[in-house]
Structures are given as structure tokens and as C-alpha cells.
Amino acid sequence: MTFDHKSLALLSEALQSLDQGFDHLPEISTTHDFDKLRDALLSATERMRDNYPYHHPLYIGQMLKPPHPVARLAYALAMWINPNNHALDGGRASSAMEKEAVTQIAKMFGWETHLGHLCGGGTIANFEALWVSRELRPGKAVAASAQAHYTHSRLSAVLGIPFRKIEVDAHGRMNVAALEKKLANGEIGTVVATLGTTAAGTVDPLHEILALREKYDFRVHVDAAYGGYFVLADNLSAETRQAFDHIGEADSIVIDPHKHGLQPYGCGCVLFRDPSVGRFYQHNSPYTYFTSSELHLGEISLECSRPGASAVALWTTLRMLPLEREGEFARGLEAGREAAIMLYTALQKDERFAPLFPPELDIVTWAVRARTASESSALARKTFEAAAQRDLHLALASFPRIMLESCSPVSHWDAEEITCLRACVMKPEHREWMPEILNRLRSAVEL
């Protein structure tokens, strides 16, 4: 058995308690045909078997972390109400829970005052941050590293603003010298610093980027959709810790609770240090905001209808696992990072592999040694397939020569990039499962 069944009993108990809040209403009858309902649900179960085992520790491919049981249960519980967090009229309790949960996230970054809300994910959260930046720096370009998420260039195009790609160093971090050259002409209004790139998990030198603000006029937006929660971890390198220690000096921050925050998809979050940017969201919708003079979440969000269940799940998780250093939640992050270091260390000792660089968070990337770059890429794809046959699921990612030369994976460069193997070692259980993961990886290479 790989799924949790025991906790479902708690859902029944919680539903009975929820029922008591509405027991003054007239009874309503359930009209569903139970047999048809069962047939439809079991048909869906059959279809859902056609999935990689994202929940299992042998899956270390993409950024898919199982929701905490309490998040699953709280989300399901909320679905019997199905609140809409656009307006208090549609999600009174869940709107209050969203505000409280977002406040806790803001405090994690050291912000006592802020403007923020949940949204569908990092893409929408980054869109709102770049949109506000456009309003504050009209006509100015957005700059992000060549390893930043591709949505930044795409969202800039949607917003009708220029985008500037900044070179990276050998570790895939933004090259600050290259950034300053682009800042010198005054065309850049916003710099996106990525704290945890999605390909390699690298962390831009935020403290150095912030230092440039003293000389040039630009906003700093931190895309911490993947890595933001690592601000709580105590086992980061000194260099990475320095970047996270300055995150509160940014103008805006994006973080995804549906990545390391143990939440179901989709649950993103955008935060602004200056609450006055809420003026850009102002609009009039009297038919949705009539129930209260309090601030409705729809008045500080570009999205309209949003699932209140996401807020309920997040609020409940934070009640059980507060966002505090040395707490249970932080220890889970640290366990994943320990597992990543274990994997990196083992790869270093295997002459068949060439790990790119030590993991800054919990993503490990490595090339397969070969004579040429194209042969290395082919071997990586072969290893990927062989590992999957052994129920070990990795990912593939291509990296430029500048990020690979220091580990010398090939003797001849017949291509300017190499397809590498990649592992998101983000489940706490990966620490205990690492010996088994390594055994299966070695078996895959020995084919």
C-alpha cells in the first residue's frame, strides 16, 4: 500500500463537525445515484493509474511534492462548501484564512506590513509582480538571468515591455557584472532575482544585485517560487544563506506553496513590500463586493474567481506546521537538502558521472561522461530510460557549456550544450531512500 487510507476517517469526523454549523437549516436530500457515482469514480481511478508515481520516493524527476495529509483533508473538507475567494460574499471564512496564511508567509521573509494574496501558481504571481513593476516603471525593461524561468520573457511580451536576458556564471547564477553593463544605459526598470532556478536549483546573488540599487534606479523582484521556503533551512551554504538573508529587501516576492509548501495544485502567492501598490488593482464591482466594507481579496488580485479551498488547505497546514526555523516544517526541507548532498557526493565518486556543481538547495544535476557532447547527451537519455524501467524516475535538462566546463564531462565539444540528468530530491523521505535510489541508478548505467 502506497497511499494513506487511515486519515480518511478524520474527514468523516470533520464533515460531521462542519455539519453542525448549518444544522439550523432545513434538511436537503441527496439525489445522487450511488451506483453511478461509484462507477464513475472507479473509472477515474483506472485512468489515474496511467501516471508516474509522483508520490513515491523513487520519483525524483520533476518538482512534484505530495501535499501533506492535512492539506488534502482540509481541501476536501472545504469542497463541501466550495468557497470562492474573490469576494467575501463567496468565501467569508476562507478569505479570512487566506489573509492569515499570507501574513504568515510574509513574516517568514521579515515583512510585518505587505500586500499579497494567493493565486493559481508562480506564473500568475510573477505576472502580477511584473505588471505592478510596469506601472511603476513605465517603458522600462525587465531583466532576468538566462537560467530564470522562461515565463519571465513570455510575460514581458504579454505586458508589452522589453525583456533583457542576463548571462550566467559557471554555477548558473546571474552574472552581476553583465547585469551592471545592461543597467548602465538606464533601460532596465526591474531585475528578477531567482532564488532557486527550476532547472538546476541555483540561487542568484541577491545581495550583490541589491547593492546595485544604490547606483541605478530599478525594482528588485524575487522569483522564489521554488526556493522561497529555504529561508527557514539551517543547512544552506554560507553563500546561499547570504542571498536568502536579504530577501526581505526586495520590492516583491513570489513563492509557490504548491511546491515546497506541501499544498495541492494550484497555490501560488505574490507579495509586495509596499501595500500602496494596491491602487493599481482598483476597480468597481458593486454586485460582488456589497456584503462588507472590508477589503475583498478580489480588490487586490488580477484573478477573479479563486478556490477558497486552497486557502483552507494552506491555513490548516500552517496551523499544524508553523513556518519557523528549527520547526518540523523546516526539518523536512533540511532532510531533502541532506539527501541532495548525499546524491551529489555519490555521483562525485562514480567515474561515469560528472555532477555540475554542489546543490544549493535540493536539485542535483549531472552529465554522463563521454568523448563528445552529443555522445554524453545520448547516454543521459539512455540512462533516463533504463532508470525508468527500474521504477526510478529522473528528469532530463539541457545546460550550456559555461555551466559544464568546470566538471569536464567530455573531451570534445561538438555541441554547445549537453542533455544532463536531473533529480529533484525534495521529499524528506529521499534521505532514507537514497541508498536504494543509488542502487537503481547504478544498475541503470550498467546496462
Image (cartoon, grey):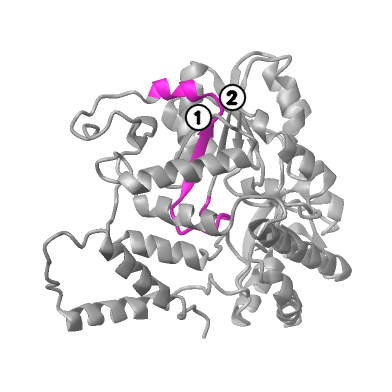
Residue 289 place in picture, x, y as percent: 24, 32
Q: Dot 2 corresponds to which residue? A: 190
Q: Dot 1 corresponds to which residue? A: 130
Region rendered in magenta: 257-280
Residue 272 in magenta?
Answer: yes
**Where 282 falls versus 49 (above or below)?**
above
Q: Give amino acid for label 2.
A: Thr
Residue 215's disc number: none
Q: Is residue 10 left or right of residue 174?
A: left
Q: What element carries label 2?
A: strand
Q: In this view, does 192 lie to the left or right of 131?
A: right
Residue 29 in magenta?
Answer: no
Q: Residue furthest front?
A: 24
Identity of the residue drawn at 41% across and 62% down: 74
Q: Tag 1: Cα neighbours inside 10 Å, few (<14), some, or many (≥20)?
A: many
Q: What element carries label 1?
A: helix
Residue 236 place in picture, x, y as percent: 78, 50
Residue 446 place in picture, x, y as percent: 76, 81
Answer with mark 1 or mark 2, whichever residue precedes in sequence.
1
